[in-house]
């Protein structure tokens, strides 16, 4: 089976999560500090190769009304370069409210919100888990339709 990498793009940090080989669960990976990284894309490509990733999903910041946010344009540039550098198709996924959910999860777990990178990693994990659940549901629905 193959793995999916999810990316929560940010100016300071990039949150990452990867699926298990069966595409059921998402596990957070260490974040990339963009201020300390020489080449963010090389680091991502290394993860793609190491984890045998076959698909990349990037969280797309969308306004509550469904329109593209200003940040979405920046994410679009990142995706174009990521596609060019990895040679892979990159899919976007609506990331509305993932930061709110990740901060709530951190509070519930008793994790300090100032812990750098934790919210970004949790956000990437939430993006990927929702992506996996939606696609699992679609596969189950189509299998039911065939019966």
Image (tube, helix red, strand yellow):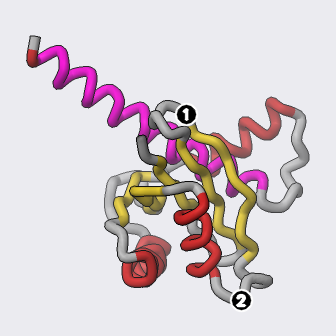
Can residue 47 be seen at all in this image of the molecule? yes
Taking the image as shown, residue 11 lies to the left or right of residue 62, namely right
Q: Reply above or below: 4 against 107.
A: below
Neighbour tally class for label 1: few under 14, some 14-19, many 20 plus, Cα within 10 Å: some
Farthest top residue? Answer: 147
Q: Which residue is mark 2?
A: 38
| Residue located 19% across and 20% down the image | 143
Q: Which residue is mark 1?
A: 25
The foreground one among 53 and 135 is: 53
Figure quadrant of residue 91: bottom left
Give the percent coordinates (x, y) of residue 47. 60, 64
Q: Reply above or below: 133 against 55.
A: above
| Residue segment shown in magenta | 118-145
The foreground one among 107 and 39 is: 39
Neighbour tally class for label 2: few under 14, some 14-19, many 20 plus, Cα within 10 Å: few
Farthest left residue? Answer: 146
Give the percent coordinates (x, y) of residue 23. 45, 37
> Magenta stretch mostly in which secondary structure?
helix
Q: Reply above or below: 80 against 134.
A: below
Q: CA distance from mark 1 to mark 2?
A: 30 Å
Whichever of callouts 1 and 2 sits on the residue coming sooner in the sequence is 1
The foreground one among 10 and 132 is: 132
Task: Look at the image and tell me in which quarter the N terminus lies.
Answer: top left
Q: Is residue 130 magenta?
A: yes
| Residue located 62% across and 57% down the image | 16
Give the SS element for disc 2.
loop
Q: Is residue 140 magenta?
A: yes
Question: Are the residues tagged 1 and 2 within 8 Å (C-beta)?
Answer: no
Taking the image as shown, residue 96 lies to the left or right of residue 119, namely left
Give the percent coordinates (x, y) of residue 87. 36, 76
């Amino acid at each position: 089976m193959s793995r999916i990498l999810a990316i929560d793009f940010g100016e300071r940090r990039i949150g990452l999560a990867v699926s298990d080989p069966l595409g059921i669960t998402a596990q957070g990976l260490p974040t990339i500090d963009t201020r300390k990284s020489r080449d963010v894309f090389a680091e991502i490509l290394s993860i793609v190769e190491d984890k045998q990733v076959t698909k990349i999903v990037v969280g797309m910041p969308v306004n509550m009304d469904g329109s593209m946010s200003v940040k979405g344009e920046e994410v679009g540039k990142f995706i174009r370069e990521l596609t060019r550098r990895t040679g892979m198709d990159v899919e976007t996924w609506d990331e509305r409210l993932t930061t709110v959910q990740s901060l709530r999860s951190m509070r519930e777990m008793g994790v300090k919100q100032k812990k750098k990178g934790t919210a970004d990693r949790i956000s990437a994990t939430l993006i990927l888990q929702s992506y996996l659940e939606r696609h699992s549901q679609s596969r189950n629905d189509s299998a039911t339709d065939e019966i």
